[in-house]
């Protein structure tokens, strides 16, 4: 009874008023749509036809027995893992280099950050233009150098398209890793390195014991956020290739889009996106386990 | 052995590495700007030539006059500015409220953000397109602004709560002792301190809404109402692509993004590094 009264006292009206608008909007714009998406995933909802009915698990059965779904799933994993690894490696290397050079670090940083500001539609136009097999810079350069006998269209060639979209995604995403890792590197106290050197540690040892240990929290958080972003990404890939050629770059979001708006089957599309969300939840829980373990070790 | 970065050769190699990366990072921007001034004849005959032989403003003229891109820019400005304004008001209140009055939840901000971040835009797209049709908001800016709040508010709250956490409690308490109420403390004491962070968050929100594509594609189909990203996309609908127009339009869309980005780059990174150290 007593604890109840104190908790009522703590019920702080002004505080609630501060957070109320944000809470309302998040509930209305995120929670409610998710619930209604779950509902539609059990129905035959169509984009155009007004009538639909409850179909139980039919949509899920249809999706989970569809080989196209598994191809899109495999493409999603490949696209996400390879993009993230590439972005991390390039961003990390650039951040270490920027942190080491004595001068012009701000200048290089400003240049290197430029891809991050590109909207997806402009990224797509720019690289389609550079890769264009008639006017494009790269195919013409390769032909002129004698590397290729004729101009190749990187976004249309089945053996090259995945490498090409990965390259663009790494080009776009590496600056975000670089900037965040760099500002984490700056928080490492310099005297730790001096102490390690006095103790006779090799540069490699102090890199692992000091640098990595200090910034792994930031890297972990970046990995979670960017994995989710890349896995969920629709516009960048769709605008570059439209999921083609012959579905080679169709990931789950593009597959859901084609099902929902191409085939008008919103119910099935909902089922696909719900499966996508469940998969992300599992992956993120694994990430969180690791982050919590690191947090405990750092204490 | 001296570590890389201390020896002269090591430093030179680092500069070489960074220079190569910078060329890769900047080349596409430079290339689309230069291409947008080349005549179509030159694009075809000299695909590798760097500088245009004759500068032409023809594409810019066509994009702005014939394609009415000025209207699309105006649409984008209205949508992005409204979304940014609402986001900043709601998120400043929310972030401050969480940090000051619900500190336990404040410590879990990052996890809360990640949870909302996990909802794929393509998942939200299904219910949004159904709801927006029901509300009769198809082809309206209101409909678009509402959907933009779904991703901009959680992110803004997260960024802002990082900034609000840096405000020392003593300053607020001093103001409270002087008799200021909670709202007055917030408006007159706290907000001015975090103003640079609020501006950075506002610019970041603006860029994200300016660049948004999926919801705009699904909810707006009349060209007079289209924001710039979808108007650009509609250039790909014709049989023969006019690359000159596409490049000129791209340059118009990207320049504000880049300028704004340069202004706030340090703020964005700082927030994340501090946020996860805690």
Image (spheres, coloured by chain):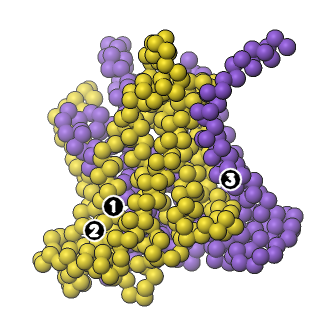
Chain colours: A purple, B yellow
Front label number (1 vs 3): 1
Mark 1: secondary structure: helix
Residues at discs 3 and 2 both on one chain: no
Q: Residues within 10 Å of mark 2 (few under 14, many from 20)?
A: many
Where's the N terminus of chain B, which quadrant?
Answer: top left
**Which of the labelled discs sits on residue B254, or is there none?**
1
**Which residue is pictured at 23% across the width and 49% down the height?**
B19
- Specify the quadrant of the image occupied by residue B257: bottom left
Say which of B163 and A141 sits in front: B163
Seen as rendered, the residue at the extreme bottom is B239
- Specify the quadrant of the image occupied by residue A195: top left
First in sequence: mark 1 vs mark 2: 2
* Spot occupied by residue A293 in the image (x, y as percentages of width and height): 62, 27
Mark 3: secondary structure: helix
* Spot occupied by residue B259 in the image (x, y as percentages of width and height): 29, 52
* Spot occupied by residue A203 in the image (x, y as percentages of width and height): 34, 26
**Which of the labelled discs sits on residue A277, or is there none?**
3
Kindly report the distance in space between the C-alpha atoms of the residues bearing marks 1 and 3. 32 Å
Q: Residues within 10 Å of mark 3 (few under 14, many from 20)?
A: some
């Amino acid at each position: 009874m007593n604890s109840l009264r104190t908790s009522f006292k703590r019920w702080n009206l002004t505080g609630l008023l501060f957070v109320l608008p944000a809470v309302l909007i998040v509930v209305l714009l995120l929670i409610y749509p998710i619930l209604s998406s779950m509902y539609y995933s059990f129905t035959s909802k169509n984009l155009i036809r007004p009538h639909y009915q409850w179909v139980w698990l039919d949509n899920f059965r249809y999706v989970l027995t569809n080989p196209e779904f598994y191809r899109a799933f495999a493409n999603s994993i490949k696209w996400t893992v390879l993009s993230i690894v590439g972005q991390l490696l390039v961003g990390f290397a650039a951040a270490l280099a920027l942190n080491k050079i004595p001068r012009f670090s701000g200048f290089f940083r400003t240049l290197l950050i430029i891809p991050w500001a590109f909207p997806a539609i402009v990224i797509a136009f720019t690289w389609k233009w550079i890769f264009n097999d008639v006017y494009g810079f790269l195919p013409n350069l390769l032909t002129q150098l004698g590397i290729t006998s004729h101009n190749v269209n990187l976004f249309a060639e089945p053996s090259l398209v995945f490498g090409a979209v990965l390259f663009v995604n790494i080009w776009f995403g590496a600056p975000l890793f670089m900037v965040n890792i760099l500002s984490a590197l700056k928080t490492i106290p310099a005297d730790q390195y001096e102490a390690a050197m006095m103790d006779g540690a090799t540069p490699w040892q102090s890199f692992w014991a000091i640098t990595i240990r200090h910034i792994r929290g930031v890297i972990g958080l970046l990995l979670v956020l960017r994995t989710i972003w890349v896995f969920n990404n629709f516009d960048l890939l769709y605008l570059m290739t439209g999921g083609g050629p012959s579905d080679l770059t169709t990931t789950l979001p593009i597959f859901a889009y084609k099902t929902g708006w191409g085939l008008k089957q919103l119910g099935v599309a909902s089922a696909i996106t719900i499966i996508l969300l469940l998969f992300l939840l599992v992956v993120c829980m694994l990430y969180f386990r690791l982050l919590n373990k690191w947090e405990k070790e750092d204490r | 052995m001296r570590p890389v970065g201390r020896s002269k050769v090591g430093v030179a190699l680092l500069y070489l590495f960074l220079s190569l990366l910078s060329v890769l990072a900047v080349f596409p921007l430079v290339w689309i700007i230069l291409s947008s001034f080349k005549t179509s004849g030159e694009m075809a005959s000299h695909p590798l030539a760097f500088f245009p032989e004759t500068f032409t403003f023809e594409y810019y003229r066509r994009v702005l006059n014939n394609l009415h891109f000025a209207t699309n820019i105006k649409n984008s400005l209205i949508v992005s500015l409204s979304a940014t304004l609402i986001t900043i008001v709601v998120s400043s209140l929310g972030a401050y409220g969480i940090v000051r009055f619900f500190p336990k939840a404040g410590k879990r901000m990052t996890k809360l953000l990640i949870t909302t971040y996990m909802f794929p835009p393509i998942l939200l797209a299904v219910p949004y397109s159904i709801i927006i049709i029901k509300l009769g908001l198809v082809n309206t800016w209101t409909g678009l602004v509402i959907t933009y709040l779904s991703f901009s508010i959680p992110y803004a709250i997260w960024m802002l709560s990082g900034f609000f956490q840096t405000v020392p409690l003593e300053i607020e308490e001093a103001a409270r002792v002087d008799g200021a109420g909670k709202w007055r403390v917030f408006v007159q004491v706290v907000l001015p301190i975090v103003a640079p962070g609020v501006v950075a968050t506002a610019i970041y929100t603006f860029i994200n809404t300016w660049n948004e594509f999926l919801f705009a594609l699904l909810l707006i189909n009349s060209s007079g109402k289209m924001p710039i990203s979808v108007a650009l996309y509609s250039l790909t609908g014709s049989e023969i692509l006019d690359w000159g127009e596409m490049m000129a339009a791209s340059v118009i869309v990207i320049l504000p993004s880049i300028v704004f980005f340069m202004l706030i780059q340090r703020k964005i990174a700082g927030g994340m590094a501090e946020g996860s150290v805690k």
